[in-house]
Image (cartoon, rainbow, N blue to C red):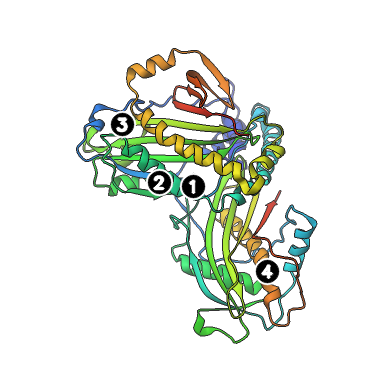
Amino acid sequence: MGVNVSSWRALALAVVVLSPSKSIAAPLIMGPLYSEPKVSTPAPNGTEGESRKMRQATLPAPPTCVLNVVELSDVRRDPQMVGLWRSAIKAPVDRAAWLRSVIQTGFRARGFQTSFGPSEAAPDAVQVKIALRSIWLKPIATNKTGSVIMRMSAGRGSLGPERFYRADVTNVNWWGSQSEFNDLSNLIFARVLDSMTVDLRPLCPGSPVADTAAPAPVQSTHVSDAR
Amino acid sequence: MRTTISQWAALAVLCAVASPAAAADPPKILPQAIRVAADGPAVEVVVPQAELDTSINVDNAGMGFGLIGVAVDAKINSDRANAASTGISALRMTLLDFDVDQAAIDTTKTALASLPWSHTHDVNFTRDNSVDGAVDYLSTSTASQAAFVSYHYEMAPDFSAVKISVVVAIADKSALPPETKIEDRLKPRNLAYRQTITTVAPLAKPTTGGENAARWAANNGVLLHKALSASFADLCSMIPRTLALTDADLKAMSAKDRKSIAGVSGTVIEDGPNGLILFDGTGLIHVQSQLE
């Protein structure tokens, strides 16, 4: 069998890439905190009505709108796990801080001020109760995919009915690194926050948006990102 | 199949020189030592997914054509993954009120309770199906055996059926030399037992993937709820039936005629009004009656 130097190099590279070294098999730990995705994502597949709502969601909320988060919970079974890629993909050690950063950083990027707990409530604040129902990241062939489901009830004076907000994103799995999966989770959270923003903005005092359409019981967005 | 683009390319280089080593299969018949153990196994239910999964037919035809072939494969697989993700979203929304994890826990308890040897303890639940996760459970368990009951539920690539697969694996600490490392006790050759049980709920007269998905999702997923409920109920009897198999049963089942249906194949064990039961060499497969 004739093998030249370049073949050996290619073989060596292949062995290195495919070998399950200790570091590759170690769990991927997400976080530690949410950061707003810097790159804009493609418009989600959906109806024109959904697209309109998504465009509205990108507008800033009225400057005085304060979200008072009266309850923020993680209701998942086995909450340390957020996915699987060779080994476990795990939530940050401080899950409470991570989830709080999703709400605080995410809604700040969408034009809201947030406060946590009833004692911090401003008189005109929109009250919200939010739960993380599910997050799961995994590979599918040469792609990676993930979804997030959150549950929210919101209102001024009293909380409205609970609604589910779900988003999923599928994109290319280049290296399967921690930062790649962490970026994916941030991207999915951002899409969920976009959907929540659509329902929250009309509740703000003096909101210029009058969304008279009856809210659907669930919001769901799907993004196939070819990057 | 868990592969990055970089690995796919490397695999194309390696495929000509590497061949997978045959791994020793664990026993498919439950050893007598397990059936008569005094304390029964500790039980961990593993559901390594948070939502209904989707599968694709992975294309690797380009593997023999170097990097260009790899790139073509990657594009095809990416398109298939995106199409599957698009179709599955509506189905997942209809399952927001269906607690599959609890159904898996209840099914495991019911199935094991019918076996005289199991002495079922409280079951532990995890999403972690990694070796590290199993090692953690085995090393902290005080029971001499640990049973891992792993569920996987998914739609067929063309949405023509919903399938639940259960792998029952039992590690017996007492059957190996004391110096055996915990992680080595979980290697296939050291497992005391492993069997797969599959139940398939096919759609009647399936057409295109999009139309099939729409039928499952109609009326807030009533058909999908029905299929999952029926499948978990089916597993309550299929799991103990599988665990009770003897060596003579396996030999007799392997000798029967083969048949392929709804994306699965195996020797025909039963064919009646409740569907078809096949044996594919790794376990029993129940293809249920078609759902209208």
Label 3 sits on residue: B192
Pointer 3 local density, CA inside 10 Å: few below 14, some 14–19, many at least 20: many
Q: Label 2 marks which chain's residue?
A: B
Q: Which badge, 2 or 1, is on the more N-terminal residue? A: 1
Please identify the residue farthest to the left as the structure is shown: B38
Q: Can residue A206 be seen from the camera position used here?
A: yes
In this view, the mark in front (2 or 3): 2
Q: Secondary structure at mark 2?
A: helix
Q: Position of residue A213 (x, y in %)?
A: 75, 66
- Please tell me which residue is depicted at 68% across the width and 46% down the height of the picture: B86
Q: Position of residue A19 (x, y in %)?
A: 49, 39
Between the C-alphas of marks 2 and 1, the distance is 9 Å
Seen in the picture, residue A106 relative to B288 is either above or below; the reply is: below
The amino acid beneath tag 3 is Ala
The amino acid beneath tag 1 is Val
Which residue is at the front of the view, B161 or B180?
Answer: B161
Between the C-alphas of marks 2 and 3, the distance is 22 Å
Which residue is at the front of the view, B188 or B67?
Answer: B188
- Please tell me which residue is depicted at 71% across the width and 32% down the height of the picture: B207
Q: Which badge, 1 or 3, is on the more N-terminal residue? A: 1
Residue A214 shown left or right of residue B284 in the figure = right
Q: Position of residue B187 (x, y in %)?
A: 36, 34
The amino acid beneath tag 4 is Asp
Question: Residue B210 bears which disc, if any?
Answer: none
- Please tell me which residue is depicted at 49% across the width and 47% down the height of the picture: B100
Question: Residue A199 bears which disc, if any?
Answer: 4
Q: Can residue B184 be seen from the camera position used here?
A: no
Between the C-alphas of marks 3 and 4, the distance is 54 Å
Label 2 sits on residue: B105
Label 1 sits on residue: B100
The amino acid beneath tag 2 is Ile
Q: Secondary structure at mark 3?
A: loop
